[in-house]
Image (tube, rainbow, N blue to C red):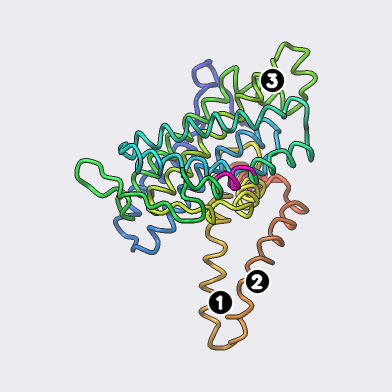
């Protein structure tokens, strides 16, 4: 009886999907993604687009925190850089949305690498405070550099167009954001099959040992910040083009905490965990809101305390996962797959 997954060639060993069950699940997922927008209404398409943007941002943050072990609380600030850069390039220079998005990602990568310089000397809580300062500095610049960003006033971005079509309609944007999410996923998965990705993981596991083996800590830590910020900037730029309005209130420290919660609950060091965490943390407030509205007739007091319930649920979920399943939803998904794969000997 075969009691594991065995490979007879290097090509099979390096495949992204090793078993028939994995390939079947992937095909089902692709079919579901393609069919979804044809059956979903505008409300669910909006949620799907929000999840898609969150997935891109969560993957970017997971590269830095989950795979490289560099804690960051500046996610909201880096998303603001991407959003404002994309908006300003479109409004001031008249760039098409796709060009401004790519250039905004590059700008965010440079800013991320700049704030990643202290990572050579700082670790853990100290690095978290340093990245939190990046969040504060970026928002201060955004709100006070009125000549460039408009300060506290919202930056209005024109509708993105492609082949005469308005891209930021819910149906059209669905294909854009999930197409980009798939590309980001493939690039990230393959990144950690290269020497760069292996260097990131070595730094996470033990940076001193990695340095002894010849890994340039400064180079690879900065590279991790740059790559992570590139995808985070992508999420910010897509938000700008989708919403048509860029304002600093969308990128507060609450956003940084939210994205950190996504990768903790989803699973650190896992692309699948980034998907699961982004879906969970994006849809949880929506579920609580709909539940509160449904029960408002029986319990009128829910309408006034619902925001506090949402905040309490947010913190409670994080605490429960840290206590009972620190490896997140990805570990639960792995346990579920192993149970059925090994049944009836699942013990």
Query: What residue span does the magenta drawing correspond to?
Result: 137-141
- x then y, percent, for residue 244: 37, 53
- Asked whether the viewer can see residue 258, the reply is yes
**Badge number at residue 218:** 3
Membership of 139 in magenta stretch: yes
Lower sequence index among marks 2 and 1 = 1
Lower sequence index among marks 1 and 3 = 3
- State the CA–CA distance, disc 1 to disc 3: 49 Å
**Badge number at residue 309:** 2
Q: Nearer the viewer, residue 104 or 272?
A: 104
Q: Residues within 10 Å of mark 2 (few under 14, many from 20)?
A: some
- Asked whether the viewer can see residue 337, the reply is no
- x then y, percent, for residue 153: 47, 56
The quarter of the image holding the N terminus is top right
Q: Nearer the viewer, mark 2 or mark 3?
A: 3
Q: In this picture, is 38 found above or below 161? A: below
In screen coordinates, is 347 left or right of 144?
Answer: right
Lower sequence index among marks 2 and 3 = 3
């Amino acid at each position: 009886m075969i009691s594991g997954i065995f490979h007879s060639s290097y090509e099979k060993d390096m495949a992204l999907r090793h078993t028939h069950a994995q390939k079947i699940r992937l095909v089902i997922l692709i079919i579901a993604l393609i069919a979804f927008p044809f059956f979903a209404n505008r409300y669910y398409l909006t949620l799907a687009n929000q999840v898609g943007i969150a997935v891109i941002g969560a993957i970017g943050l997971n590269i830095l925190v989950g795979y490289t072990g560099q804690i960051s609380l500046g996610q909201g600030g880096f998303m603001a850089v991407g959003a404002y850069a994309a908006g300003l390039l479109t409004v001031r220079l008249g760039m098409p949305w796709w060009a401004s998005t790519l250039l905004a990602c590059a700008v965010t990568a440079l800013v991320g690498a700049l704030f990643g310089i202290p990572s050579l000397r700082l670790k853990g809580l100290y690095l978290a405070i340093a990245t939190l300062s990046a969040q504060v500095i970026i928002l201060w610049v955004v709100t006070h550099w009125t000549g460039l960003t408009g300060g506290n006033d919202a930056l209005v971005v024109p509708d993105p167009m492609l082949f005469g079509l308005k891209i930021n309609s819910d149906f059209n944007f669905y294909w854009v954001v999930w197409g980009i999410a798939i590309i980001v996923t493939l690039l990230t998965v393959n990144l950690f099959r290269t020497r760069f990705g292996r260097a990131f993981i070595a730094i996470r596991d033990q940076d001193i040992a990695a340095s002894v083996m010849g890994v340039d800590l400064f180079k690879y830590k900065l590279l991790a910040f740059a790559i992570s910020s590139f995808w985070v900037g992508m999420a910010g730029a897509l938000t700008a083009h989708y919403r048509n309005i860029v304002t600093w209130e969308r990128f507060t420290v609450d956003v940084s905490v939210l994205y950190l919660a996504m990768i903790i609950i989803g699973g650190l060091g896992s692309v699948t965990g980034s998907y699961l965490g982004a879906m969970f943390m994006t849809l949880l407030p929506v579920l609580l809101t709909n539940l509160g509205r449904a029960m408002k007739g029986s319990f009128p007091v829910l309408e006034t305390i619902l925001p506090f319930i949402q905040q309490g649920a947010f913190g409670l979920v994080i605490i429960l996962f840290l206590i009972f399943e620190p490896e997140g939803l990805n570990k639960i998904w792995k346990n579920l797959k192993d149970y059925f794969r090994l049944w009836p000997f699942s013990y």
